[in-house]
Amino acid sequence: MSTYKPRLHYHQVVWKNPEHLQLECNRDVACRANAGMSLYGFCIRDERGDLVCTRAKGLELGTNIEAKAIAIKEALEYCRKELFTNFIIETDSLSLKYMILKQWKIPWELVGVIEEIGILI
């Protein structure tokens, strides 16, 4: 075992500007333990990579997936309020993506926010 060297697997992730006349929303969350205090933030960038908007807010007790869903809902509400129609919202959560697309079962604690996202899409 002393000669064991773990093999590292990695791939580079590079942010690219959205296409011409398109906006891109990136969001992230932080949770103190899973099912603890959390917060979300999102930013919207234009085709040049310039910030159009940033938002962040603390949330009550919840899971990281709840915070991610709320971040997407809040970003969609902002885009609707500002009449943005050509935008992309990125997520690093495959499970949340499939729940929004109705390809995976939605846990009961996420039903409300996922339904709101469905209305906003």
Image: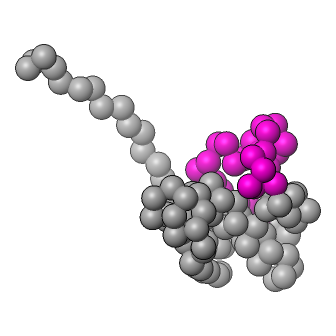
Front-most of residues 113 and 72: 113
Query: Quarter holding the C terminus?
Result: bottom right
Seen at 62% across and 54% down, the residue is 65
Occupied quadrant, residue 62: bottom right
Seen at 84% across and 82% down, the residue is 81
Rendered location of residue 18, percent (x, y): 66, 62
* Magenta region includes residue 92: yes
Front-most of residues 117 and 45: 117
97 above or below 20?
A: above
Q: Which residues are magenta?
A: 87-111
Occupied quadrant, residue 25: bottom right
Seen at 83% across and 60% down, the residue is 112
* Magenta region includes residue 97: yes
Is residue 19 left or right of 100 when viewed as pictured?
A: left
Front-most of residues 24 and 117: 117
Rendered location of residue 21, percent (x, y): 76, 69
